Amino acid sequence: AQKVTQAQTEISVVEKEDVTLDCVYETRDTTYYLFWYKQPPSGELVFLIRRNSFDEQNEISGRYSWNFQKSTSSFNFTITASQVVDSAVYFCALSGPNAGKSTFGDGTTLTVKP
Amino acid sequence: DSGVTQTPKHLITATGQRVTLRCSPRSGDLSVYWYQQSLDQGLQFLIQYYNGEERAKGNILERFSAQQFPDLHSELNLSSLELGDSALYFCASSVGAGPGHGAFFGQGTRLTVV
């Protein structure tokens, strides 16, 4: 069975602070995929990143960066110099090697205050 | 705009009724996924179709059914509705059948059962 744990239910920061959202996963698959999605107050789910289990390179995209560590089964997401527009619920998700269904974590609500 | 279109955006109906939610995937995407997001269950995978065929099934109730048509749009049918079916229903699409591609989500249909 697959499981995704986002232990941080809510995080509140002041604008320009850096913030890291934690994601820990469990799977028996050797091939798997990890995702991060953003759900702003408007409700839609926005795809941010996909990482497969064979690619442990960290990734940076603008103010966003992701740290994938198989040794600790973690796929953490860092926002540098946070902005008010980053306020949203962030979901980490896990998929196995075959069908595209994803198991989502419960989400972390990030509030960035001006 | 993800390119995935869901209609209607909002739906209010009474218990015992039947509704149909519609999803048009991004151009070129062959896979369609349905997810349910509720406060108590979080984001739950319901079902996936790939090129008209059922590909994966999740926690979908027997009262719910889905199909994908030759033009690749999909419909999710919810019948004998109960108060607990009130939720945000998302459709997502991706190019392939597997999880190797990030899924792009529509804006969701908010179903309220009264």
Image (tube, grey):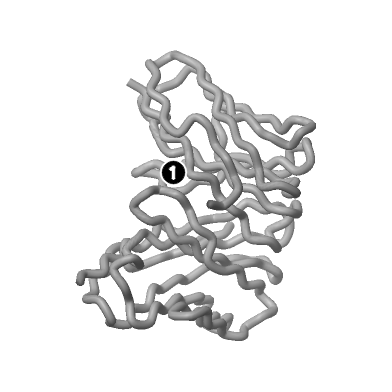
What amino acid is found at the position of numbered circle 1 in the picture?
Gln
Eyeballing the image, is A113 above or below B22? below
Spot occupied by residue B4 in the image (x, y as percentages of width and height): 59, 45
Residue drawn at (56%, 85%), measured in percent from left and top?
A: A58
Element marked by disc 1? strand
Residue B92 at x, y percent in the picture:
59, 47
Badge 1 local density, few (<14 within 10 Å), some, or many (20+)? some
Percent x, y for residue B109? 46, 35
Asked if residue B32 lies left or right of residue A48, the reply is right
Which of the 4 quarters of the picture holds residue B70? top right
Q: Quadrant of residue A106?
A: bottom left
Closest to the observer, B61 or B2: B2
Relative to A22, residue A88 above or below:
above
**Location of residue B82 in the rendering, given as x and y in whole percent from the top left corner:** 40, 22
Say left or right for B58 vs A38. right
Residue in the image at 25% along x and 76% along y? A15
Q: Residue sitting at 45 percent across and 75 percent down? A: A77
Q: Look at mark 1 in the image and give the residue it sits on.
A: B37
The quadrant in which the C terminus of chain B is found is top left
Q: How many marks?
A: 1
- Location of residue A21 by image quarter: bottom left
Pick the front one: A36 or B9: B9
Whether residue A15 sits left or right of residue B73 in the image: it is left
Q: Is residue A47 above or below residue A65?
A: above
Chain letter for mark 1, please.
Answer: B
